[in-house]
Image (spheres, grey):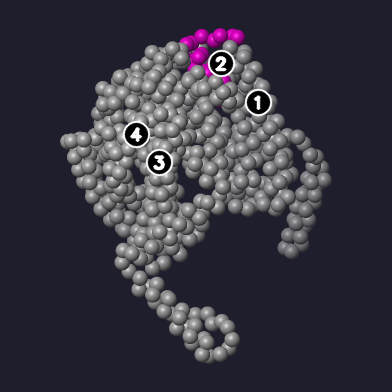
């Protein structure tokens, strides 16, 4: 019996050593990313009510804006709003804004905070000692959160269509998917940056809240970009969801794809994606190094 | 009893007598004054915790503006000017900016009370100090009142900051003669809101991870409260719910005094309704809290996560 245990232990040590000996550092490990995404999704599936709750709650958040607009301008819309936005149904306008905003909210609260939750469950240090590139872990977390976010955004959109009797163009489906994919890729870079900041600052509540409220303020969710001051409009376009909201709104409500503006949107989102990935990964790597040097990885 | 110092019996005896008397004094403390001192100590402790996080201080300063500015931009986008004829029909004023600025300032105070105080015991539980606090010689509800005191100061400063900046930066018009009566309304509103806070504390004590329930409840309460729009724009069924909430009458009273529009029968109705709801909510809230707190202690579930 003792011999058997001894042999098994030797085997494990041998296997482990073989794995480590044959291990080669890679820029990206897709298996690790998939494993991490599946792990996160398994946990998420254990709490199915969360999907429904996060699909319904945003209605309570944007209803006050609709009611406020109604109180000021009267039911329907106002001439001034139509003249600056180009749309004449305020609810139809707002719902698209919130549908796309769900992805931004998700990238800030879910993807950015992933490592905080690992830390709270005591698994951050083991996770960081696994021989896989950090980018794989980050990407795995981002993919699982995007799947959850898409389900929640879908629930929100469906409920709003039924509740308010809204109509959107079917032509918009494919262009919307293309824009959303590019926007989500750009948002990943944004999330990596946040994940790095959270490694350094630990308690993310205030930081995350501040970033969330600021991006919400400059995003054209409840009002058109034209309602913002000129300098803020520029800042607004630096948030990837702004291009997403503007383009998807245009196509979904008007039902026509303007090839020039659509190509410009794709180009803009591509450019933002490259910039955010470079900055995001750079900040994350620096934050990781900074935290490790201080032995502060598991600290609270 | 720990004995320290040189091994001389006389000194030990003196030390024992002194410590015993402090201990006994602590246990003998009773009355409103003692509870107010305990509540104040809790409020000061919370300020010390908040000030040890520089980001929290920054957030505290900019938060009222981040909440108000989106409403301001939306208002400007739909109104196209400084006046709204439709608002005059449904709320009796054309000045939409002042209307939403005052309502939005009140939101900060209400959020601070409901979330800050409602989750105070949960925070103590998370840092492992809830049982210690529960075993201190003070009334259990003082724990909640102490956090309320802190959040009144915290939220109150936010209201002053936001309204002050709104007057200076955005040209909001306030009736200065209405400031003192508006503060009176705030005092009355705190009693009713405290009843709601006790209910939230009960949910937190019983359900532990109760943020989802609280998020739903507070979202509904904020939706039916006339913070940035009058009740008239709500669907009829929600208007009835709104009349039963102390927050509705608090906001109406607070804004009415600061805009100089609350006089005559409307004044009596607002104050009367608020007083009535205050009594109902605080009595129900206190009873619920006592029952929930006893139940959780009897189950030995105070420190359970």
In the foreground, A4 or B79: B79
Q: Chain of mark 1?
A: A
Q: Which residue is mark 2?
A: A175
Q: Check disc 1 and report its element: helix, strand or loop.
A: helix
Q: Which residue is mark 3?
A: B159
Q: Check disc 2 and report its element: helix, strand or loop.
A: helix
- Circles 4 and 3 on the same chain: yes
State the residue at coordinates (58%, 37%): A111
Magenta highlight: main SS: helix
How far apart are the alpha carbons under marks 1 and 2?
A: 18 Å
In the foreground, A227 or A138: A227
How far apart are the alpha carbons under marks 2 and 3?
A: 45 Å
Mark with earlier residue (1, 2) = 2
Front: mark 4 or 3: 4
How far apart are the alpha carbons under marks 2 and 4?
A: 49 Å
Q: How many marks?
A: 4
Is there any visible trace of residue A85 in the rendered image? yes
Q: Chain of mark 3?
A: B
């Amino acid at each position: 019996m003792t011999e058997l245990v001894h042999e098994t232990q030797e085997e494990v040590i041998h296997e482990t050593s073989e794995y480590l000996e044959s291990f080669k550092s890679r820029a990206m490990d897709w298996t690790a990313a998939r494993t991490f995404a599946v792990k996160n999704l398994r946990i998420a599936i254990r709490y199915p009510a969360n999907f429904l709750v996060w699909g319904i709650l945003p209605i309570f958040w944007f209803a006050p804006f609709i009611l406020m607009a109604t109180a000021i301008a009267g039911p329907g819309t106002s001439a001034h709003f139509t003249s600056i936005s180009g749309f004449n149904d305020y609810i139809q306008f707002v719902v698209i804004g919130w549908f796309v905003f769900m992805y931004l909210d998700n990238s800030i609260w879910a993807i950015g905070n992933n490592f905080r939750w690992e830390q709270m469950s005591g698994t951050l240090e083991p996770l960081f000692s696994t021989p896989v590139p950090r980018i794989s872990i980050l990407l795995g977390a981002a993919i699982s959160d995007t799947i959850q976010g898409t389900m929640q955004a879908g629930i929100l959109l469906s409920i709003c269509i039924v509740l308010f009797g809204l109509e959107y163009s079917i032509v918009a489906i494919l262009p919307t998917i293309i824009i959303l994919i590019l926007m989500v890729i750009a948002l990943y870079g944004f999330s990596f940056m946040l994940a790095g900041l959270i490694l350094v600052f630990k308690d993310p509540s205030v930081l995350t809240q501040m970033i969330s409220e600021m991006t919400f303020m400059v995003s054209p969710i409840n009002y058109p970009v034209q309602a913002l001051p000129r300098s803020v409009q520029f800042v607004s376009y630096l948030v990837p969801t702004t291009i997403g909201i503007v383009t998807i709104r245009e196509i979904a409500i008007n039902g026509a794809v303007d090839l020039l503006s659509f190509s410009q949107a794709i180009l803009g989102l591509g450019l933002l994606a490259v910039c955010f990935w470079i900055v995001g990964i750079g900040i994350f790597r620096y934050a990781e190094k900074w935290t490790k040097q201080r032995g502060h990885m598991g600290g609270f | 009893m720990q004995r320290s110092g040189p091994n001389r019996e006389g000194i030990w005896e003196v030390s024992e007598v002194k410590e015993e008397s402090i201990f006994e004094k602590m246990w003998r403390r009773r009355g409103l004054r003692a509870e107010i001192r305990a509540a104040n100590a809790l409020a000061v402790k919370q300020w010390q915790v908040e000030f040890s996080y520089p980001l929290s201080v920054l957030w505290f300063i900019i938060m009222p503006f981040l909440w108000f500015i989106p409403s301001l931009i939306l208002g400007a986008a739909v109104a196209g000017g400084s006046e709204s004829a439709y608002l005059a029909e449904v709320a009796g004023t054309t000045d939409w900016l002042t209307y939403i600025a005052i309502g939005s300032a009140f939101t900060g105070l209400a959020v601070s009370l409901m979330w800050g105080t409602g989750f105070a015991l949960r925070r103590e539980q998370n840092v492992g100090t809830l049982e210690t606090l529960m075993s201190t010689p003070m009334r259990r509800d003082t724990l909640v009142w102490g956090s309320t005191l802190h959040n009144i100061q915290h939220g109150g400063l936010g209201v002053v900051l936001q309204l002050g900046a709104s007057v200076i930066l955005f040209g909001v018009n306030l009736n200065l003669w209405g400031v003192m009566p508006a503060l009176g309304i705030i005092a009355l509103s705190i009693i009713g809101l405290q009843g709601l806070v006790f209910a939230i504390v009960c949910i937190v004590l019983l359900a532990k991870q109760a943020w989802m329930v609280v998020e739903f409840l507070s979202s509904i309460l904020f939706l039916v409260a006339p913070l940035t729009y009058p009740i008239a724009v709500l669907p009829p069924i929600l208007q009835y719910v709104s009349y039963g909430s102390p927050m509705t009458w608090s906001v109406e009273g607070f804004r009415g005094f600061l805009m100089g529009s609350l006089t005559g029968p409307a004044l009596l109705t607002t104050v009367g309704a608020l007083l009535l709801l205050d009594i109902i909510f605080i009595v129900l809230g206190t009873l619920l809290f006592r029952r929930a707190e006893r139940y959780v202690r009897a189950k030995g579930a105070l420190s359970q996560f």
